[in-house]
């Protein structure tokens, strides 16, 4: 799984957006990889929602790919919920390990 941290500054940087677009294209060609987006603040989420100068492929990907929101300085409960959501989003390696052992 590939985890991408997206901030408003990142999404405003044309070089960074090009790298993100290239990564999304690579993911479309090889479905073995999974992408999880973590938006670092509300500003990055609002850039995705607006008609922004982001390429169409990136706009679509940011709308449909799984994402989490992280905002620093939040109360410990919000932080706890973020980490809980992140654990749920990650693949369960124990299941993969069990299936590998059964194949032998």
Image: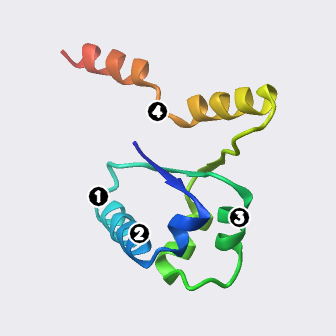
Q: Which mark is residue 91?
A: 4
Few, some or many C-alpha atoms within 10 Å of disc 4 (few <14, some 14-19, many ≥20)?
few
Residue 62 position (above or below residue 32): below
Few, some or many C-alpha atoms within 10 Å of disc 3 (few <14, some 14-19, many ≥20)?
some
Mark 2 and mark 4 lie on one chain; the one further toward the N terminus is: 2
- Looking at the image, the residue that sits furthest to the left is 104
Residue 101 position (above or below residue 13): above
Residue matched to label 2: 16
Q: Position of residue 92 (x, y in %)?
A: 46, 26
Q: What residue is rendered at 67% in x and 85% in y?
A: 51
Residue 6 located left or right of residue 72 = left
Residue 32 position (above or below residue 94): below
Residue 33 located left or right of residue 61 = left
Mark 1 and mark 3 lie on one chain; the one further toward the N terminus is: 1
Cβ–Cβ below 8 Å for labels 2 and 4? no
Depth check, front residue: 43 or 2: 43
**Looking at the image, is mark 4 or mark 3 nearer the viewer?**
3
Give the Cα distance between marks 2 and 1.
21 Å
Mark 3 and mark 2 lie on one chain; the one further toward the N terminus is: 2
Cβ–Cβ below 8 Å for labels 3 and 2? no
Residue matched to label 3: 43
Cβ–Cβ below 8 Å for labels 4 and 1? no
């Amino acid at each position: 799984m590939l985890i991408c941290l997206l901030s408003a500054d990142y999404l405003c940087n044309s070089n960074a957006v090009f790298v993100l677009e290239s990564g999304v294209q690579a993911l479309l060609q090889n479905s073995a990889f999974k992408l999880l987006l973590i938006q670092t603040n509300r500003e990055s989420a609002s850039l995705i929602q607006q008609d922004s100068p982001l390429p169409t492929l990136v706009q679509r990907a940011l709308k449909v790919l799984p994402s989490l929101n992280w905002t620093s300085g939040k109360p410990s409960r919000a932080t706890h919920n973020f980490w809980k959501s992140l654990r749920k989003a990650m693949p369960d390696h124990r299941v993969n390990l069990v299936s590998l052992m059964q194949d032998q």
